[in-house]
Image (tube, grey):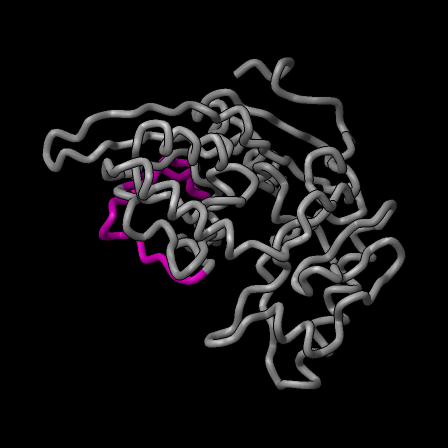
Amino acid sequence: MNQEKMNLPTKISLKPFNTWGVGGSCSNLVTPKTINDALDAYLSAKHKEELVYILGGGSNVLISDSNLNATVIHSVGLNKILLNKNTLNDNIEIEVESGFPVQELLAIAVKNNLSGLEFLTGIPGTFGGVLWGNAGAGQEDFGKSITRLETIEKNGTLRVWNRDELNWKYRTCPFNSRNTVMITKCFLSLKEAPKEGILEKIKKFAALRKGQPYGKMTAGCVFKNPDGMYAGRLLEDAKCKGLYCGDAIVSTAHANFIENTGNASASDIFYLSEMCKKRVYNQYGVELEYEIRFFGDF
């Protein structure tokens, strides 16, 4: 691994690397170009007993305002993709690395008349990020299409997980984060289907996202939906829309989104989200669970 090419200057700002445009800096930012580079970066940090954070598109993360004395592995360089015909069941297998952009993956599936990823419509970020959060829509997620995954484990090894080892749950990946560091690549099995039907499904999922604040500095939904309920509706009924802290404001379009309207800090966003969480609990007795991930201390 060429450290000179991969390591950016120390204490580099992380604001450009997340969709909220907030946060402090880190002591070591590494952008690996291969999976072995990513493994080397992790082993180096492990040897130095540094914390490690995995950053993809930065569309579902809140980064602390302070300097992170940690290695941040930015996965966007892991962007290889390969399509193979599966002779056993006539499906098409896609091998895709974790830094590949989600919307480019969906576009490739549509171009090749492959069905099974339509629920990714409108979801930003990298493939590894949506896998780690098991992103989905309309009761659909990755459970049906993934055949195996590769990860870096905390003991410094690469591990392959087969389909029968993967237990996908709502907005939760199958991995124990205490043992798994990052997803490196994934294998999908998709069925060929008429393009018209694929495009109709995409329209259906696009309609589910109407009302979300597109074009704003947000990080997607802040909270997961509780069982049988919608976090956005609970937040709206608790009159959270329009609440603000500094330049952070709860979207008036969708109460489960917080917008950075200018110069919000990560602390502003966190304080506002905690205020909303408390309002919902006081009114309904429901403890909302964060969907976003946190880098650093809050």
Q: In which quadrant is the C terminus drawn?
A: bottom right
Residue 223 picture location, percent across and down: 60, 64
Q: Residue at x 52, y 73 (%)?
A: 226
Viewer-proximal residue among 28 and 273: 273
Is residue 159 something that shows in the picture? no
* Boundaries of the magenta span: 148-170
Is 238 or 88 nearer to us in this picture?
238
Q: Is residue 23 left or right of residue 247?
A: left
In the rendered image, residue 1, in percent from the top left (x then y), is placed at 52, 16
Note whether residue 278 is visible: yes
Q: Based on the displayed image, in which of its 4 quarters is residue 210 positioned?
A: bottom right
Residue name at image x 83 percent, y 49 percent:
261
Q: How many marks?
A: 0
Q: Residue at x 48, y 37 (%)?
A: 102
Residue at horizontal 55 percent and vertical 54 percent from the top: 209
Q: Position of residue 275 (x, y in %)?
A: 77, 71
Nearest the viewer among 227 and 56 is 227
> Does residue 155 appear to the left or right of 241 in the view shown?
left
Q: Is residue 126 magenta?
A: no
Image quadrant in which you'd find residue 26: top right
- Residue 160 located within the stretch drawn in magenta: yes
84 is higher (above) or lower (below) than 18 = above
207 in relation to 11, above or below: below
Q: Position of residue 34 (x, y in %)?
A: 46, 21
